[in-house]
Amino acid sequence: MRIALYITIAVSLFFTSCSNEPTLQKYFVENSEKKNFIVLDVAPSIINVDETKLSADQKIALASFDNMNVLAFKLDKNNKAEFETESKKIKEILKGKEYQELMKYGSGKDAASISFVGDENNIKEFVLFGKKEENGFAVVRITGKDMNPNNIMNIISILKSSNINMEQLKPLQALMK
Amino acid sequence: MNMNNQKIEFLKNKKLEIMKKVILSLVLVLSTSTFFAQSVFDKFDGQDDIATVIVNKKMFSLLSKMEVKDKETQQYVNLIKKLDNLKVFVTSSDKKADEMKAVSEKYIKTSALEELMRINDKGKSVKIFVKSGSTESQIKELMMFVEGGSKDESVLMSLTGDFDLNELSILTDKMNLPGGAELKKASKTKTTK
């Protein structure tokens, strides 16, 4: 009986802690429908490569990579205030315990950072954040299982030899204009 | 007899208590000083007119987990393992440069950094300070301040970890750190000493 009680307490704690902390995933969901935002899901198929030509290591690396989600905010004359509050919100989320910052760059106007979720040998999620005063900001989530530095290096080596399917990235072009 | 025993016991307890207090206060002082060391430059982060690059320990430990085959990169990875934090602040505003200078000078005094070398060249001055570890060339912290004068940018760089000064030249070769050439000279002078 007692054990059951402990478990329920633990589980309820787990859930409350989950629902209290704002996560990027939630943020993505909440804002994907709003105007000013551009959402993009990129499937691994973007890496247009002949799998038979990959080495064993490269195959493992490719399998560790699940999905890439991009959420971008396009800045124009009318949404400056919203841009400020939204980019602040994301910065706050990234300050959360779950997100471990790897490195960041910042000047007064522009900023960029790389964080990850999980531990060093088993990275569940990479988060890239970039902000530019003239264009807007973008958050990129790269999710997977068991991503590690070697897998990332291997992915990069795959990317070099592949012809990336640019069709999937089309919506982002609006941001660059 | 009994009284004496009690007295001794009491004194022993008192001694223990004092010891505990000393240790506790030592811990407090040490922890605050490391806390201080982290935050002293952090105020420059996110300011207008200052460009910041911060690389955290996690990044270094992730990088060091990579499998490498060639020897040169292996050396590089070995060094990276020993690094904790890299912070670089760059500004072209005179006011911010003065502020950085003041903060770094204060920091040098409070945390007892030694001057490793100083170069003056055409109105540009480079100063490198280190905090030595167990041996002479073992470094716990390296701080560099480049005063650009009115023309050039000023750079404040802080690198912490536990590394050998001689290894640093590998880093400056691989990464494009500001003042890399000066650092290379610094590591050479220290070895010939």
Image: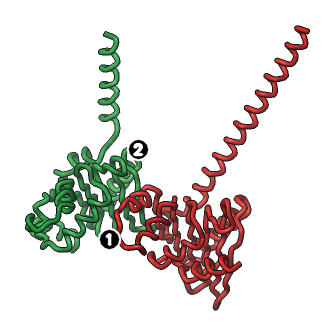
Give the color scheme: rainbow, by chain, secondary structure or one colour. Answer: by chain
The tint of chain B in the picture is red
**In the rendered image, which quarter contains the C terminus of chain A?**
bottom left
Q: Residues within 10 Å of mark 1 (few under 14, many from 20)?
A: few
Disc marking residue A134: 1
Residue B128 at x, y percent in the picture: 64, 74
Residue found at x 30% / y 34%: A19
* SS type, badge 1: loop
State the image quarter where residue B161 is shown. Answer: bottom right
User: Eyeballing the image, is B153 above or below A103?
Assistant: below
Residue found at x 16% / y 59%: A59
State the image quarter where residue B99 is shown. Answer: bottom right
Residue A170 at x, y percent in the picture: 13, 68
Where is mark 2, residue-wise?
Answer: A97
Q: Please report, as a chain letter, where disc 1 is located.
A: A
Q: Please report, as a chain letter, where disc 2 is located.
A: A
User: Eyeballing the image, is B177 above or below A42?
Assistant: below
The amino acid beneath tag 1 is Glu
Q: How crowded is mark 2: few (under 14 residues within 10 Å), some or many (20 or more)?
A: few
